[in-house]
Amino acid sequence: MSAADGSTLTRATYPIDQPFYDRLIGSRDQFTVVSETVTDHTGYGFRVAAGQAFRLTMLEAPQILDVCMANADDPTEHFFSGAQMTIEGGKITRGIRLWGTPPRSRPIATCIADSVRVQENVRGTRDHFAYGAHCNPHLWHLHAGVHHRPCYDNLRYGYAMLGLSQHAIHDNVNLFQKGAYDPYTGSAMVEESDARRGDHIEFYAEIDLVVSVSLCPNGSGSDGLRESWSESGPLVPVHPIGVTVLDTATRPPAWPPEE
């Protein structure tokens, strides 16, 4: 990567057992199904044991998913978007680890599959944000003057299924949302997802996780947030997804990595 003055920018590297993940990804066809669920129009919560994987699949059409991930035994350890931007960058795809909060500051999940075919464009947008958050009642009132069911309520519902309160909700990943931030103005740019029916993304759990998923009321995404959120405007379709938990028969590597 090059800076504006032509110099080369370097990112700090963090230890990773690359052969381990190469073997894990290469063995995906040997994973066994633990559970399969179809969910639509709301939130959904589930647990994933360390060493298991979970897959989120588009069953009919692209659908933005706001997803929270936290330590199943201590939800104060959860996905940390600030560390994610510093360590791995702002986009998620195969080979990217998701990082948790201090004091452990460790990977909590690793993306091992992403079937979305990126459509390159001049704005540099692509699916799977690592630095977003969720819509909430305050944003609904700001944009549309109404309180439809936002992602915050969906995430709260998903965590309630696991016995957790809204205090477990945190800044989340935005999967299947195609977007970026304008480097000059800082404005968010959101476009319709590149995902298609059957596309999926899959994560390997580095620790025991509780996961809450919201099917975003903005559907497949667009720049017209005010229009799509308007009570008088056309309804944005929200599409069902498949949630599959898989047994990989592979325990996570130690953290910090052994010398």
Image: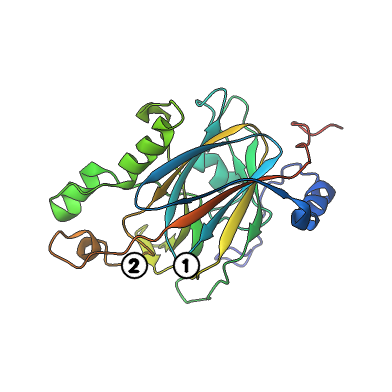
Residue for point 24% across, 63% down: 228
In the image, residue 4 above or below residue 149: below
Callout 2: SS: loop
Q: Which mark is residue 85?
A: none
Q: Earlier in the sequence, mark 1 or mark 2?
A: 1
Q: Disc 1 marks which residue?
A: 125
One can see residue 64 in this view? yes
**Quadrant of residue 87 in the image?**
top right
Q: Nearer the viewer, residue 193 or 56?
A: 56
Residue ID at (44%, 61%): 180
Residue 179 located left or right of residue 20: left
In the shown orientation, is residue 97 left or right of residue 72?
Answer: right
Rendered view: 123 above or below 105: below
Residue 81 vs 218, above or below: the answer is above
Q: CA distance from mark 1 to mark 2?
A: 12 Å
- Left of 259 or right of it: where is 196? left
- Write down the residue under mark 2: 222
The spot of residue 130 in percent (x, y) is 51, 50
Is residue 114 or residue 190 the one in the foreground? 114
